[in-house]
Image (spheres, grey):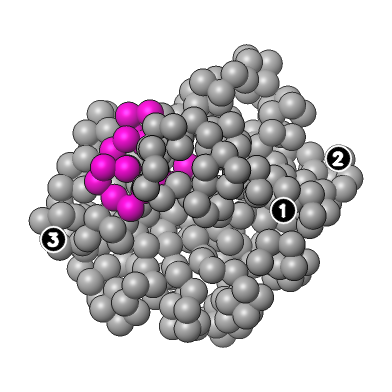
Amino acid sequence: MWVGARNWPADQAEVKDAFAELEALGYGAAWLGGAEGDLLRPEQVLTATTRLTAATGIVNVWTEPADEVAAAFDRVDGAYPGRLLLGVGAGHAEFVEQSGQTYQRPYSKVADYLDRLDAAGVPAAKRAVAALGPRTLRLAGERSLGAHPYLVTPEHTRLAREVLGDGPLLAPEQKVVLSTDENEVLRIAGPVVEFYLGLPNYVNNLRRLGFTDDDVSGSGSWRLVDALIAWGDPDTVARRVADHHTAGADHVCVQVLTARPGPPRAEWRALAPALT
């Protein structure tokens, strides 16, 4: 399950309860969106569980210094060996420039960051790279455990596996709305899709997948929403997840969208029989 900041539990007690339940339901990993370089949130997840993997999706290479991230990784991985996956990536110019930095040559920035993690002793096999286009996908396969594509379709997963070849991890994110009502799906997922259509990295990737100007304009076409959001009952959602596996995914990061803040624990429970 992929959990963003909006869905992060309100306090430490709820963190413990929510992720202990996630583990008990049979899920294998918690992906934490927008992770800070101190890795405190992954550490909280690992403290609350006994076997769950905590993965960052992602630590931003512009805003989180590599030496500080490496020190945090050493601390957490040392306490919970083999259960932390450090996902890193370039993020988006719109947010990086708000921090006062210049967003340029993101591929080179990621490669340099991986060099710095190498120098600090963070093993390539314990990190992943956010990747959409072929060049960054190849970098992910060569310099880390593999790739974590976000806001993608099973068709992108197929193309990504062709680029990566056999071996590297391919862990795409898949958004889910657990509803059979199209109007409710649009109410919940429409604003989310519209937000991402304001970020050129994602729009460019969607164009590579064959979506048109009409699809990626405004809040997006229904065709686009239907392609990006797995919606319906749990079995229907599970079929979309299976489509990613058939296309070459090793692991699918399911992000449940709801109209309310906090962890979507009811939806986790409802999906567990079909997904785990």
Q: Is residue 96 magenta?
A: no
Query: Mark 2 belongs to which amino acid?
Result: Glu
Secondary element type, mark 3:
loop
Question: Which residue is more in the foreground, 75 or 172?
Answer: 172
Residue occupying image coordinates x 34% and y 72% = 82
Q: Does 228 sit left or right of 35 as displayed?
A: right
- The residue singled out by tag 1 in the image is 238
Do the numbered discs 2 and 3 sit on residues whose CB atoms are within 8 Å?
Answer: no
Mark whose residue sits in front, 3 or 1: 1
Q: Quadrant of the N terminus?
A: bottom right
Q: Is residue 100 visible?
A: no
- Say left or right for 109 vs 9: left
**Is the residue 250 above or below the residue 206 in the image?**
below
Give the label on residue 120, or none.
3
Please tell me whether mark 1 sits on a helix, a strand or a loop. Answer: helix
Q: Amino acid at mark 3?
A: Ala
